[in-house]
Amino acid sequence: NIEQTMIKKILVAVLVAVPMSVAAQKFGVVSADEIFAAMPEVAEIQTKLGEASKQYEDEYAKLNEEMQKKFAEYQQLEQDASTPQSIKERRMQEIQDMDKKTQQFLQTAQQDLQRQQQQLMQPVQEKLLNAIKTVGAAQNLTMVFPSEMPAYVSAEVVDITPLGKTQLGVK
């Protein structure tokens, strides 16, 4: 019975302490996308990626043009009855090989652009995350949630998006 009394006292203490600890917590929300889009580094990276993409597109256009030329030559050979079948087959094989190489080039270009984007964006994303952490700590927030996600946000939740922009020096 002393044990039951002790357990009841502990339960009462826990029940009293839990609401107090929840009430002491402060939460924040942030629109990381909004801050990210305002960072000048992002525009610079998009320009670099655009330039790289243009180079790949130009090269792809050249490869495609070459293949079209070969195909036009093949069509002329196909109509010429005096051209041996083995030559026609060899030319068709060349076109197929060229098509394979073009497709491989396209795949490699896409992978390279993705790798470049990931490599260039990572430091910017880390900088943004650090700014959010700094502002969250300065505001004594328990947690910061993405503002795009919550179904409900009370008036007590602090939107730190403007503070995050200030921390990074962006508008």
Image: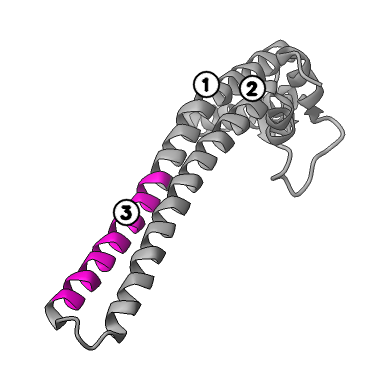
Q: Decide whether residue 98 is among the magenta residues.
A: yes
**In the current view of this chain or complex, which residue is farthest to the bottom?**
81
Q: Amino acid at mark 2?
A: Glu
Expressed as whole percent of the image width and height from the top left, the position of residue 128 reads 62, 22
Distance between the alpha carbons at the discs numbered 2 and 1 = 10 Å
How many neighbours does mark 3 have within 10 angstroms: few (below 14), some (14-19), or many (20 or more)?
Answer: few
- Secondary element at tag 1: helix
Circle 3/circle 2 CB separation < 8 Å? no
Q: What residue is pinned by disc 3? A: 104
Q: Is residue 136 visible?
A: yes
Q: Is residue 13 visible?
A: no
- Secondary element at tag 3: helix
- Secondary element at tag 2: helix
Q: Is residue 84 above or below residue 30?
A: below
Q: For this view, does 153 lie left or right of residue 61?
A: right
Expressed as whole percent of the image width and height from the top left, the position of residue 7 reads 52, 31
Q: Amino acid at mark 1?
A: Pro
**Looking at the image, which is closer to me, 81 or 5?**
81
Q: Earlier in the sequence, mark 3 or mark 2?
A: 2
Circle 2/circle 1 CB separation < 8 Å? yes
Q: Which image quarter holds the C terminus? A: top right
**Span shown in magenta:** 87-109
Q: Earlier in the sequence, mark 2 or mark 1?
A: 2
**In the current view of this chain or complex, which residue is farthest to the front?**
82
How many neighbours does mark 2 have within 10 angstroms: few (below 14), some (14-19), or many (20 or more)?
Answer: some
Q: What residue is pinned by disc 2? A: 41
Marking on residue 123: 1
